Each structure stands twice: as structure tokens, then as C-alpha cells.
């Protein structure tokens, strides 16, 4: 059955416009040449198009051949298009991309075989038409993929297979247009120059080089002379890419100028002069069309996700600001409500309940108003101070006993209310502080990371894990600012492998890069493992501890860990007092700080969050100091973080400095601001951290020790051993000394 319904599916205007364009394309491509033989561009176009546009291509080609007297020369092309058209008329599946390619290849082979039989060159011509048909069919298949994609999404998809299809069609189109019979212009070079310049301007040098190479390839397929005149077009596209983001005219001038100079340097011929004119025309075409360009209509392999970090960052920062605004507005509303409740008129309340029923009310409140009000105010003030005697101004009151009893009762109510308001205010302040911490955490999460994502390494890691049956949710590889490779692998908590070193060894073997592994971080539902190349520096840490009074439990807690990005943390916490209770508090602080920081929380926000937890964890007073050192082993930048901790002593460049911290321990107040300062270390520098068990009178001895000795283990042992000598107080405290030494990796 003939598919006549296809003629009326689209709107009349669309059908007429598409028909006229197809007719013009058929006419223009009828006598085009490809690699010295008749171009198959019009056959492939007819095979890719659906009804009624395929017949328009055939009609345009027939008109050109009849008017030019080349019907006999193009008989194979014409008969092939007729066969393609017949197939499309009778079969619905003929418009599928794969079937389009098969139909075109078969049609060319059948037509070519028939012509070969007629001229008596069957073997030679058959081999030619087999190759010719295969190439034509592949071009038709690529064109059909493009057309179906445009029908579905109305977007030029250059990613993955779509990019290959566009490359094939673009190259063949340039070749056909370069050989088209035009009197004063070469359409292939003109359009190819405009496309190359546009790709360089909007997609930088990579786009310019790619499109320039495809344009030069198409020109060579048209003829070697045409190809040689634009062989250096990719170089012009490369230079034009550096003008991306500037004015269109600047990019066009740079592109044309470089193209002209390269042509002159390679030798000026008649063809090169003609090509210069076409490149200039292409530059003008770009200037005219560039303002209408929008990446809304083009998808490349990278531009879909390139703006996602900026979008996520903007959204997180906006959310942080919105939470901060809610916190501020909530505080204002709470203050307004509190102000209104505190200003309730106690005088009016007492007079309403007592004086309303008194027969002397008018005498007191009219004739002696000032004296009565003054007496009431003194009475209320004295009751708030736990004195319930009536003032002299109310000595003659007939209802003195009732007045005194009510005043005492209301005073107790006011006292209770104030206590409740104070507690509510403390809880509200703590809640606002927690909201502020969340606000800071979200804002910090929105900061852009200075990393470079590696598609190749990420794919290798994922394939290696799948090959060995290691189930994972995601694996991402990237390079940091120091150009070190870092890999993050995420597992479900139930599918976390037992051996992290085995995973590290597998990935190291696959990438042929020695990697180290940071400890796994558990978020509850997922577990993250970080693998990393070793940074330039390494950190040696030594410790020495002593418990107060021979107590088996030391109230100090310390730990050392690396977050997997090249940043190491050394943490020391001193719990309140000594013994087991102090140890629990310090362990809680250290454990929470490590978990939060390892999960990606900023250290300032981590301190504030831990402080709010310590404040609310129990009714008993409990607090602990926090002394943390954060060292970036790529740059040797050190950040000292202190909350009520003892001083830190640094031996740096031959000198010794002491850093004290004007801050409070964690868990004392609702709001906690850690003291932070930054220092730059170098190879061989030493840092000494101490708990409160080390008296300040020992610091001069520590400085002398650092100047004379470089053995960190001996230094920390000597400091801990001398703690009793320098501690003149009768109260003993737990002692912990940590020594850090920076050195370059061997």
C-alpha cells in the first residue's frame, strides 16, 4: 500500500518549505564530485529524508541533469534515487536509520550492476559500486540519525554517536559544496570557514581545530587543489580559539589574518587567492550569524555538565543565605514577643483584683493618685526582692492583708516566669547557634573545589572494580591543585569490602601509580574510601603521656589522621579534671571532630557543632579543650585550631615561637568561637602540642630543648618527664605531649 498519508501529516507551510529546500539541495548536489567521481551526497540525502522530501531531492537532481545535459552521466545516481523512493513509498520501516543505509547501499549496487552489465565491465564496476554503495549507505545512515534526533529533541547533539554522525555528514557536505558549480564563490570553503570560526569562538581552540580539520578533509575529498588551499585552516581555528569571549569582529579578524598569512607563507597561487576571498566571506557570515547563536540548541560531550559546579555552588550559597535570614528574623520575632510579655502592667493587675471591690477606690485613685501609684510600685519592687511588707504610702489601706497576699503570689509567678524565660532564652540561643552552624556548613559546601576531573582514570577505576566483582555505587578520580591524583570510591554500607588495602593495590596496578588509602568514612548509609598519590611532604608524630596520681585512665585523648586529600590532622583534647570521666569527654570531642572533618565539614563549623552537643548532652557541667593542627602536606601550610587549649610551640627556620589561644574550652557557653591562626612550615620544622598538665613555667625549658635537639621522640619524652618538676601546684593533672616533624617524602 502506498504511504500517501505521509504527505498530510505535517503542516502545509512546513511541507512546502521543506520541499523547496530539498529541491534546491538536489539541484545543487546533482553534479558535485567526491574524490574524482560523482558525489553520492544527493543519494544519501534522498535516502535519509522521508516523504515528501525525498522525491524533492530526486526532482531537483533531474532538473539539473536535464538542463545541463548530464542525464546519461548520472544515470546510476538517478536510478538509485528512484529505487530508494519506491521503497519509501511502500514500506513504513524504510525511514529507520539502519534501513535508510541498507536501502541506499542496495539501490546503488542494483543500479550499478545493471549499468555494468550494459557496458560490459561487470567485475571492475561491481567492485567499485560495492564500495561506493557501502560509503553512501553509511552516510545516509548518519544523516538519518541526525534527522531523527532533530525531530525528537530539536537539538544538535554532538555527544557520543551523534558527534560521529555529524562529523561524517559535515565532511561529505563540505566536499559536495566545494565541488558544486557556483560562479563566484565556493560554498564549501565559505560555510566551512564560518563553522570553523564559530566553533573556535564558542568552544575555544579544540572546537576550531576539530571543525577546521573536518573542513580541510572535505575540501581534499572535493579536489587536491581545493584541499591544499585550506590545509592550514585548523591552525587558524586554533589561534581564533584564544579570542573566545571577545568581540566577534576581533575573532573574525584574527582568524582571517592567520589564514591569509599561512597561505602567503606556503606560497600564493590562484587557488589560494580564491580561497582567501571565500574565507573572508565565511568570516563575514560568522559576524552576521554569531549574535543569533545559543548553546540551547547544541549539546557537546562536555558542555552539559560544565556549569553544574557553578549551579550547585550558587544554590548552596543561596540556601545558606536564606537559612541565615530565617535565623535573624526568628530572633527579632522572639525579642518582640519577649518584650511584650515583660511589659505587662503589674500595677493594673493588682488594682483590678483588689481595689475594684473597695468602697474607697475613688479616694485612693482619684484624690491621691500619685501617692497610690508610688506605693504600688514600691510594694511590687520590694516583693521582687523577697520583702513583703507594705510601704508607708499604703499603710492606711483597708485591704492591706489581701493586697499583701496577692502581691506575694504574683511575685512568685513573676519569678517563675522569668526563670522559664531565661531557660527558654538559653534554649533559643542554642537553637539559633545550631542553625548558624548549619548555615556555615551549607555555605562551605558551596565553595568551588580547585580540582580537575579525570574521565579516563574514573572509567579505569570503575571497570577494574567491576572486573573483580567489587560492588560500588560511584567512583570519581580527579587531580588537585598540586596535580596529584585522588580517587573517591563510594560503597553501600552493607556492601563495603573488608580489605581497603586490596582495593588500593588493585587500583594502583591498573593505573600504574603508587597510591595510598585513607581510612574509610561511614556516613550511615554509605562508606567512602579515598585513594591518593603521596604528597610532597610527610608528617612524623610522637607522643608521651602520664596519668595523674597513677590513675590507669588518662583524661587526655589524642589522634592523628589524614582525610585523603593530602591534609593531615593532629588532635589533642583535655577533659575536665582527670580520670575516666575526663577521658570520656575528651574522647567524645576528638571522635566527633574527626568524623565531621573527614566527612567534609569545615573545621570551624565542626567546633561549633561539637560545642552545642557538649552543652546539651547532660545536665551536669562538662567541657573539654580542643587543640588541633591541620597541615596541608602539599604546601606545608599549617592551621592551628584552639578552644581553651594550652600554647603550641613551633621551631621554625632556627627560631622558636609560642602561640597562645585566647579562647574557652568546648561545652562552657552556647556559642563557641575557636581561635585559628595560620603558619607556614618547611622541611625539618617541629611543632610541640601539650595538654594542661604541662605548666607554663616549663615553656622556657621546652624552647631551649627545641633549640638544642632535633630528635622529636626524645623531646616529647623529656618534656613529659619534667612536668612534675615544673608543676608547683599541689593539684596533679594528666600529661600528654605531642611532637610533630615535617619532612620531605623520600
Image (cartoon, helix red, strand yellow):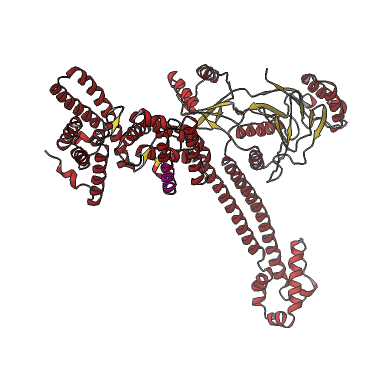
Q: Quadrant of the N terminus?
A: top left
In percent of width and height, residue 700 lies at: 87, 29
Give the mark count: 0
Seen in the image, is 506 located left or right of residue 58? right
Looking at the image, residue 668 lies above or below residue 719: below
Residue range of the region highlighted in magenta in the rendering: 281-292
Residue 19 visible (yes or no): yes
Residue 304 visible (yes or no): no
Q: Residue at x 82, y 26 (%)?
A: 654
Seen in the image, is 156 located left or right of residue 41? right
In percent of width and height, residue 384 lies at: 74, 62
Looking at the image, residue 287 lies above or below residue 588: below
The answer to which of 338 and 210 lies nearer the viewer is 210
In percent of width and height, residue 549 lies at: 80, 26
In percent of width and height, residue 269 lies at: 42, 32
In which quadrant of the rendered view does residue 514 lie? top right
The answer to which of 85 and 357 lies nearer the viewer is 85
Q: Quadrant of the C terminus?
A: top right
Q: Residue at x 25, y 42 (%)?
A: 22
- Indicate whether residue 614 is drawn in magenta: no
Seen in the image, is 479 located left or right of residue 495? right
Amino acid at each position: 500500500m502506498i504511504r500517501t498519508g505521509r504527505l498530510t501529516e505535517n503542516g502545509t507551510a512546513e511541507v512546502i518549505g521543506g520541499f523547496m529546500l530539498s529541491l534546491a539541495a538536489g539541484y545543487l548536489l546533482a553534479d558535485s564530485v567526491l574524490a574524482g567521481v560523482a558525489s553520492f551526497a544527493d543519494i544519501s540525502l534522498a535516502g535519509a529524508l522521508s516523504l515528501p522530501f525525498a522525491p524533492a531531492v530526486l526532482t531537483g537532481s533531474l532538473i539539473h541533469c536535464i538542463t545541463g545535459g548530464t542525464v546519461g552521466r548520472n544515470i546510476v545516481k538517478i536510478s538509485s534515487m528512484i529505487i530508494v523512493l519506491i521503497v519509501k513509498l511502500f514500506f513504513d520501516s524504510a525511514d529507520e536509520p539502519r534501513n535508510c543505509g541498507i536501502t541506499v547501499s542496495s539501490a546503488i549496487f542494483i543500479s550499478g550492476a545493471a549499468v555494468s552489465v550494459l557496458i560490459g565491465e561487470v567485475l571492475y564496476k561491481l567492485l567499485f559500486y560495492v564500495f561506493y554503495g557501502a560509503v553512501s549507505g553509511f552516510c545516509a545512515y548518519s544523516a538519518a540519525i541526525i534527522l531523527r534526533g532533530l525531530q525528537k529533541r530539536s537539538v544538535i547533539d554532538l555527544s557520543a554517536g551523534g558527534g560521529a554522525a555529524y562529523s561524517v555528514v559535515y565532511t561529505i557536505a563540505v566536499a559536495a559544496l566545494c565541488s558544486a558549480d557556483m560562479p563566484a564563490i565556493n560554498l564549501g570553503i565559505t560555510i566551512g570557514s564560518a563553522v570553523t570560526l564559530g566553533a573556535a569562538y564558542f568552544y575555544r581552540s579544540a572546537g576550531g581545530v576539530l571543525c577546521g580539520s573536518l573542513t580541510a578533509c572535505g575540501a581534499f575529498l572535493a579536489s587536491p587543489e581545493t584541499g591544499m588551499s585550506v590545509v592550514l585552516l585548523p591552525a587558524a581555528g586554533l589561534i581564533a580559539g584564544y579570542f573566545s569571549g571577545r568581540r566577534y569582529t576581533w575573532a573574525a579578524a584574527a582568524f582571517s589574518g592567520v589564514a591569509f598569512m599561512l597561505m602567503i607563507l606556503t606560497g600564493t597561487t590562484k587557488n589560494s587567492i580564491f580561497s582567501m576571498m571565500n574565507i573572508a566571506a565565511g568570516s563575514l557570515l560568522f559576524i552576521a550569524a554569531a549574535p543569533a547563536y545559543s548553546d540551547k540548541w547544541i549539546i557537546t560531550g562536555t558542555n552539559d555538565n560544565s556549569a553544574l559546579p557553578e549551579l550547585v555552588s550558587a544554590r548552596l550559597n543561596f540556601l545558606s543565605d536564606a537559612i541565615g535570614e530565617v535565623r535573624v528574623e526568628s530572633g527579632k520575632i522572639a525579642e518582640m514577643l519577649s518584650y511584650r510579655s515583660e511589659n505587662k502592667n503589674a500595677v493594673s493587675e493588682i488594682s483590678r483584683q483588689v481595689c475594684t471591690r473597695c468602697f474607697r477606690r475613688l479616694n485612693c485613685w482619684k484624690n491621691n493618685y500619685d501617692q497610690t501609684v508610688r506605693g504600688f510600685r514600691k510594694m511590687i519592687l520590694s516583693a521582687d526582692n523577697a520583702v513583703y511588707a507594705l510601704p508607708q504610702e499604703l499603710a492606711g489601706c483597708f485591704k492591706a492583708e489581701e493586697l499583701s497576699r496577692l502581691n506575694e503570689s504574683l511575685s512568685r509567678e513573676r519569678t517563675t516566669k522569668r526563670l522559664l524565660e531565661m531557660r527558654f532564652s538559653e534554649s533559643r540561643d542554642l537553637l539559633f547557634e545550631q542553625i548558624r552552624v548549619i548555615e556555615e556548613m551549607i555555605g562551605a559546601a558551596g565553595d568551588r573545589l580547585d580540582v580537575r576531573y579525570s574521565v579516563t582514570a574514573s572509567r579505569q577505576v570503575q571497570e577494574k572494580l567491576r572486573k573483580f566483582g567489587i560492588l560500588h555505587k560511584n567512583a570519581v578520580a580527579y587531580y588537585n591543585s598540586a596535580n596529584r591524583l585522588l580517587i573517591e570510591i563510594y560503597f553501600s554500607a552493607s556492601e563495603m569490602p573488608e580489605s581497603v588495602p586490596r582495593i588500593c593495590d588493585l587500583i594502583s596496578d591498573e593505573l600504574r601509580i603508587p597510591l595510598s588509602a585513607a581510612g574509610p568514612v561511614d556516613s550511615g548509609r554509605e562508606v567512602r574510601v579515598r585513594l591518593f598519590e603521596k604528597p610532597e611532604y610527610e608528617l612524623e608524630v610522637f607522643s608521651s603521656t602520664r596519668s595523674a596520681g597513677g590513675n590507669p585512665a588518662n583524661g587526655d585523648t589524642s589522634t592523628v589522621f589524614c582525610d585523603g586529600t593530602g591534609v593531615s590532622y593532629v588532635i589533642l583534647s583535655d577533659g575536665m579534671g582527670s580520670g575516666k570521666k575526663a577521658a570520656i569527654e575528651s574522647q567524645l570531642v576528638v571522635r566527633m571532630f574527626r568524623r565531621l572533618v573527614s566527612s567534609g565539614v569545615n573545621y570551624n563549623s565542626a567546633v561549633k557543632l561539637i560545642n552545642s552537643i557538649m552543652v546539651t548532652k547532660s545536665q551536669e557541667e562538662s567541657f573539654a579543650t580542643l587543640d588541633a593542627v591541620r597541615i596541608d602536606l602539599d604546601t606545608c601550610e599549617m592551621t592551628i585550631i584552639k578552644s581553651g587549649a594550652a600554647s603550641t610551640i613551633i621551631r621554625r627556620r632556627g627560631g622558636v615561637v609560642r602561640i597562645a589561644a585566647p579562647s574557652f574550652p568546648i561545652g562552657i557557653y552556647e556559642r563557641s568561637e575557636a581561635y585559628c591562626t595560620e603558619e607556614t612550615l618547611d622541611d625539618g620544622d617541629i611543632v610541640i602540642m601539650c595538654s594542661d598538665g604541662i605548666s607554663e613555667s616549663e615553656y622556657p625549658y621546652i624552647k631551649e630543648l627545641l633549640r638544642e635537639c632535633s630528635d622529636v621522640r626524645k623531646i616529647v619524652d623529656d618534656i613529659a618527664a619534667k612536668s612534675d618538676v615544673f608543676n608547683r601546684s599541689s593539684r596533679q593533672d594528666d600529661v600528654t605531649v605531642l611532637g610533630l616533624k615535617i619532612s620531605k617524602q623520600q
